Amino acid sequence: SELLQTLVEDGVLITTPSQDYDDDYALEYARRHDGYILSNDMYRDHAHKVGLAGKMFFGDFVGGEHHRSTQDWLNEHRITYTFVGDELLLNPAFRPASNSTKPAVLMRS
């Protein structure tokens, strides 16, 4: 659609190669930039894939630590949400990583 093309051209929307696994891109980008992921996806398939590869840990480093499990990282960096009418409501129980240098608030009012 024209809207999607405009978002891509403006650098707001990043696409991934269609044959690749998009979770890898989103998670790696958030990990590299100490970012948060706004998603209701539990990433169970990603955790399963990482486990099958014999890796219990997410990437080489997560926040400078070698001993972080994928699930631990996701618990501290994935923010779930819902919509109430047309209002986005972030999970009020979310607690950011204690060692994060970035604010967990991702939206402005």
Image (cartoon, grey):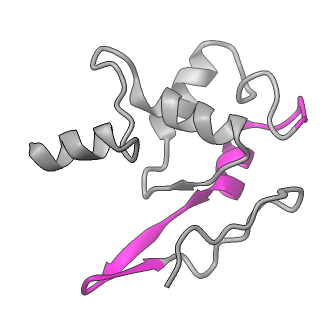
Q: What stretch is highlighted in magenta?
A: 64-89
Is residue 14 or residue 96 the one in the foreground?
A: 14
Residue 108 in magenta stretch:
no
Is 52 displayed left or right of 59 in the figure?
left
* Residue sitting at x 50%, y 65%: 80
**Residue 105 in which image quadrant:** bottom right
Is residue 70 or residue 86 the one in the foreground?
A: 86
Q: Looking at the image, is 5 positioned above or below residue 42?
A: above
**Residue 53 in which image quadrant:** top right
Q: How many labels does the image show?
A: 0
Q: Looking at the image, is 5 positioned above or below residue 25?
A: below
Q: Where is residue 83 in the image (x, y as percent from the top left)?
A: 33, 78
Is residue 107 or residue 68 the one in the foreground?
A: 107
* Residue sitting at x 68%, y 14%: 54
- Taking the view exactly as shown, the residue that stands out farthest to the left is 1
Q: Looking at the image, is 84 positioned above or below residue 18?
A: below
* Residue sitting at x 70%, y 41%: 33
* Residue sitting at x 72%, y 46%: 73
**Residue 70 in which image quadrant:** top right
Q: Where is residue 28 in the image (x, y as percent from the top left)?
A: 61, 31
